[in-house]
């Protein structure tokens, strides 16, 4: 195998043939795309919510406690709140329950619960068994409110600022670390939370 | 041909309400949502539920998915159509809540021009490349002698 | 301790693969006879130990050894024996082991035919295959060993995803992998040719049978997957442009282009560098597919659990293997150009456009599949792509491709042109119109806009493919294996196109809530719901419905759709009841108990859907016929190979 012509030259015609480097170039571009995809892959399972930065969707739903005043989005104004979508059928909600109880204990951010695709009896039993971290719980048996909030899995939690704007959404379990790093950090960055007024019902 | 065509048409007319508009025929999930009052609305419903993604199941359409959430979202689409929304309004309604991820059909806007334009663009490039190659090789046809094709070639292809 | 044997077997296999790579590549470079002779032995050893590792894992599954984490995650003592074995490839670690096993099996096939190749070339091919095997074994041992232990040993396993407990699923991955991985042989041949800088086109002749075999297996694998999805997933869909499906389809498209390009290179020495590039691309797409599925880049019903560390490893492997091969291409391919020519209307010209259109089709699928990542990289926001993009976009290159096939199949080489075939082309077109148009407009009625086009194209392809063989038979000439294979494959394609056309255009689906005794019409068919009852299976309980189907008063079939609940995973699975038929399938599935004794049911009519898979299998059959028919012309008629080998042997 003697090689008189330089590697990139076509024999006999002279001139450099850059087109043979084109496949390598395209491959490099592909690698960039794949690498970006790989870097972002942990986030792939979490679809970014378009509601972040927007006003919380309005709702008014029956209270879990029969005879109680309806739970509405009016309760989200004037102070920081956490809206937590859960169900008694949801295993991960069980896991995050202790964190929610801890948040309730801290007393700065009230938790409004939306009981999703559930029955009042099951929900009440569940809360009796595990404890009730919620200031109020509303019933959403056919998912209308959940759809308005772009909910596709349980548990999902939304951090609402005193102006009623959704500041952050967490899909999945809230652990104490996540509470600190994602929720508290945002509250403190905006000046901290004053204890909310007590509400009845 | 006698009337198999007509009897087919008659039979199909009853079921024609439910033939989807999408190119690749798809099955519906078993949908407990009551049908819409007019055939046009029902067809729009079918088209929309095939174009929307079920958010809980990876890569299934709202029409195909069996999970509760899909049923509720189908119900929502049903109600939105009854309220008189256009297809685009229904899609916008859901996109404003769930993000563009919910659409199986990437919106046809300038941002996605590269994707929708890709087939045509590639065809152009391909055609030009092919043309250049053919023109180049045509010039060489007379240059090279008719070399004998080696003996393992099928005689069929030797002509 | 026995399980660790599998682990050690893999380590040995890896070392032998390294030996195979070194001996295979360095041997010819340093002109060492004995090294070149050692490469096949190393390959055999690697196969033996890989097979041993697979055997150990199978044994662990059969004996319900839940101390092995992979077994515990994917099997269960209540699982029937057959599925305990096929659970081997139910998840990532086992499927990678299957990949490695299939790769070493293909290597063994190459070793078996090694004497038909010049010594150096053969050694280099084995060397490249050794590099690939080594990389995968290293990956397995480093990140995904199926032999990892689990402490404490659970009493029972988690069991196999119910969707995967099915006979077709058992066969689908091995067949698919045989195809996928088989392109590694083409890749190795291409690399060997480039390393040697061969100016002849013999390597194309050697490469072709391997390529066609891999292509045929891949076609079968894809057809199996589609068929399985159809009856297993329960909603009558057979192709959803799911990313994992796309990722097996792209190598097939490029593989089709490759096998056509090989023909031109073999016969006329043309398109050499292009053929090499296609060979590299086909296997690169296989590797890409492996990467995408395991690295958490995809959201799909198919995808394995995401693990970015594995993704990084495979990405690195891709860079080294594909990047290295492409670099080799950039350096060597320019030297391998030919000076042959051909006319505008010639077989070469048609095959050129065949290639261009197939590659465009593959590129479109790639663009759509990676669109979310591309959009992310270019900061174009989030994007989601599904069938509404793929289906129309795919048609753009494919419809012209089909038309070109029906015409170009008559073209002669070089300056041959088509003038001799003008009458034939017109006749076949007219016949195709006569068959296709009434079929789509009258028999099936209410076609979608492209349906007549698809019907005519499908018929035209079948007719055009049959013209030449029939003509030769009439003239009492022999039919070579290649011609028979080509004809069968093209006929298969035509049948496939017909199936897809009518299924897409004329399927009927109805969702109805029915009480026992009620009847729903689906086309001409009357579906009567009789009721449900509870049944029990080996590892599930189910609700079983009965639906009687009649047509014009005659009983057609009785369908029994089920809704199963599996004990272990506590998941539900809908099993559709299917009444198959060559001209149509009828389906019924159970939905939900809607109360008042009524159930919601999905009823479907699917015309000609079987043709989709039958067409695919016939295509694969055509490929196999072409390959195995050739074997009669063994090495004796390859005069060039012997002198080169002899000449090289003399200097020691």
Image: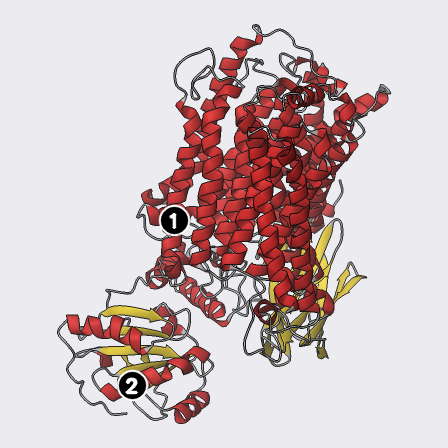
Residue identifier under label 1: A35
Query: Looking at the image, what colour scheme do you see?
Result: secondary structure
Q: Which mark is residue C109?
A: none
User: Eyeballing the image, is C638 above or below C487?
Assistant: above
Q: Residue furthest front?
A: C652
Please name whichever residue, A156 or C545, is drawn nearer the observer in this view of the structure. A156
Badge 1: chain ID: A
Residue identifier under label 2: A102
Residue C458 location, quadrant: top right
Left or right, residue C135 beside residue A160: right
Residue A194 location, quadrant: bottom left
Residue C83 location, quadrant: bottom right
User: Eyeballing the image, is B27 above or below C618?
Assistant: below
Q: Which quarter of the rendering shows the C terminus of chain C? A: top right
Please name whichever residue, C292 or C519, is drawn nearer the observer in this view of the structure. C292
User: Eyeballing the image, is B142 above or below A183?
Assistant: above
Where residue C245 appears, as percent x and y from the top left, is 56, 50
| Foreground label between 2 and 1 | 1
């Amino acid at each position: 195998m003697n090689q008189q012509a330089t590697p990139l030259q076509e024999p006999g015609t002279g001139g450099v043939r850059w087109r043979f480097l084109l496949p390598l170039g395209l491959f490099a571009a592909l690698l960039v795309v794949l690498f970006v995809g790989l870097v972002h892959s942990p986030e792939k399972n979490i679809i970014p919510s378009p509601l972040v930065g927007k006003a919380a969707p309005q709702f008014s739903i029956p209270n879990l406690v029969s005879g109680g005043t309806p739970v509405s989005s009016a309760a989200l104004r004037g102070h920081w709140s956490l809206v937590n979508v859960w169900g008694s059928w949801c295993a991960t909600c069980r896991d995050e329950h202790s964190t929610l109880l801890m948040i309730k204990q801290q007393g700065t951010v009230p938790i409004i619960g939306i009981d999703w695709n559930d029955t009042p009896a099951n929900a009440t039993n569940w809360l009796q068994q595990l404890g009730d971290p919620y200031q109020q719980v509303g019933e959403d048996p056919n998912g209308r409110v959940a759809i308005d909030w772009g909910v596709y899995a349980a548990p999902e939690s939304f951090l609402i600022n005193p102006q009623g704007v959704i500041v952050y959404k967490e899909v999945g379990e809230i652990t104490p670390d996540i509470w600190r790093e994602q929720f508290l950090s945002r509250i403190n960055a905006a000046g901290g939370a004053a204890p909310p007024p007590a509400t009845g019902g | 041909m006698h009337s198999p065509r007509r009897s087919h048409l008659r039979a199909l007319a009853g079921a024609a309400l439910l033939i989807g508009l999408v190119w690749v025929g798809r099955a519906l999930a078993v949908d407990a949502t009551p049908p819409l009052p007019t055939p046009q609305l029902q067809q729009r419903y079918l088209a929309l539920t095939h174009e929307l993604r079920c958010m809980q199941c990876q890569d299934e359409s709202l029409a195909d998915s069996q999970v509760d959430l899909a049923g509720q979202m189908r119900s929502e689409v049903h109600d939105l159509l009854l309220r008189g929304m256009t297809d685009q309004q229904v899609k916008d309604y859901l996109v404003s809540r769930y993000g563009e991820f919910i659409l199986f059909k990437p919106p046809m806007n300038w941002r996605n021009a590269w994707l929708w334009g890709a087939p045509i663009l590639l065809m152009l490039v391909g055609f030009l490349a092919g043309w250049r190659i053919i023109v180049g090789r045509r010039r060489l046809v007379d240059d090279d002698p008719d070399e004998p094709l080696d003996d393992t070639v099928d005689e069929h292809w030797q002509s | 301790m026995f399980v660790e044997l599998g682990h050690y077997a893999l380590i040995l296999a890896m070392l032998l693969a390294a030996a195979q790579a070194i001996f295979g590549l360095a041997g010819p470079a340093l002109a060492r006879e004995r090294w070149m002779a050692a490469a096949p032995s190393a390959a055999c050893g690697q196969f033996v130990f890989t097979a041993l590792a697979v055997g150990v894992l199978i044994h662990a599954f059969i004996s319900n050894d839940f101390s092995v984490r992979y077994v515990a995650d994917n099997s269960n003592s209540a699982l029937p024996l057959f599925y305990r074995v096929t659970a081997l490839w139910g998840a990532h670690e086992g499927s990678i082991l299957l990949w490695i096993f299939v790769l070493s099996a293909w290597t063994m096939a190459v070793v078996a035919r090694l004497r038909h190749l010049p010594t150096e070339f053969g050694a280099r091919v084995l060397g490249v295959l050794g590099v690939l095997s080594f990389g995968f074994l290293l990956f397995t041992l480093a990140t995904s060993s199926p032999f990892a232990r689990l402490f404490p040993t659970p009493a029972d396993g988690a069991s196999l995803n119910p969707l995967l407990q099915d006979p077709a699923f058992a066969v689908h991955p091995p067949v698919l992998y045989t195809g996928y991985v088989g392109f590694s042989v083409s890749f190795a041949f291409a690399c060997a040719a480039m390393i040697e800088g061969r100016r002849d086109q013999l390597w194309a002749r050697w490469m072709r049978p391997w390529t066609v075999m891999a292509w045929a297996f891949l076609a079968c694998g894809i057809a199996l997957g589609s068929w399985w999805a159809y009856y297993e997933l329960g909603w009558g869909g057979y192709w959803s442009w799911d990313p994992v499906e796309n990722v097996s389809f792209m190598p097939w498209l490029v593989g089709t282009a490759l096998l056509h390009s090989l023909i031109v290179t073999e016969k006329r020495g043309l398109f050499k560098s292009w053929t090499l590039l296609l060979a590299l691309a086909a296997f690169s797409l296989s590797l890409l597919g492996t990467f995408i599925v395991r690295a958490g880049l995809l959201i799909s019903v198919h995808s394995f659990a995401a693990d970015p560390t594995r993704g990084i490893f495979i990405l690195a492997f891709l860079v080294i293997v594909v990047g290295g091969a492409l670099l080799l291409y950039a350096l060597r391919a320019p030297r391998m150009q030919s000076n042959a020519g051909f006319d505008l209307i010639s077989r070469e010209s048609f095959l050129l456009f065949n290639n261009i259109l197939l590659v465009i089709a593959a590129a479109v699928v790639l663009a759509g599949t990676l669109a979310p990542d591309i959009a992310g990289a270019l900061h174009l926001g989030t994007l989601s792509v599904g069938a509404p993009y793929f289906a129309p976009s795919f048609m753009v290159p494919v419809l012209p491709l089909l038309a070109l096939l029906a015409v170009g199949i008559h073209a002669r080489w070089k300056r041959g042109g088509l003038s001799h075939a003008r009458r034939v082309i017109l006749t076949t077109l007219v016949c195709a119109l006569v068959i296709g148009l009434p079929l789509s407009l009258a028999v099936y009625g209410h076609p979608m806009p492209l349906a007549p086009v698809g019907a005519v194209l499908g018929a035209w392809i079948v007719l055009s493919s049959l013209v030449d063989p029939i003509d030769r038979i009439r003239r009492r000439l022999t039919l070579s294996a290649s011609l028979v294979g080509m004809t069968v494959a093209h006929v298969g394609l035509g049948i496939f196109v017909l199936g897809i056309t009518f299924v897409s255009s004329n399927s009927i689906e109805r969702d109805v809530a029915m009480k026992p005794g009620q009847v729903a019409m689906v086309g001409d068919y009357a579906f009567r719901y009789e009721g449900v009852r509870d049944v029990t299976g080996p590892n599930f309980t189910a609700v079983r419905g009965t639906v009687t189907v009649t047509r014009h008063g005659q009983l057609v079939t009785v369908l029994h759709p089920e809704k199963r609940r599996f004990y272990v995973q506590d998941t539900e699975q809908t099993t559709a009841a299917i009444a198959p038929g060559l001209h149509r399938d009828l389906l019924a599935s159970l939905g939900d108990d809607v109360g008042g004794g009524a159930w919601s049911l999905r009823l479907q009519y699917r015309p000609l859907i079987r043709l989709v898979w039958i067409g695919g299998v016939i295509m694969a059959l055509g490929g196999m016929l072409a390959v195995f028919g050739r074997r009669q012309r063994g090495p004796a008629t390859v005069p060039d190979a012997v002198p080169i080998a002899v000449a090289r042997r003399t200097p020691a």
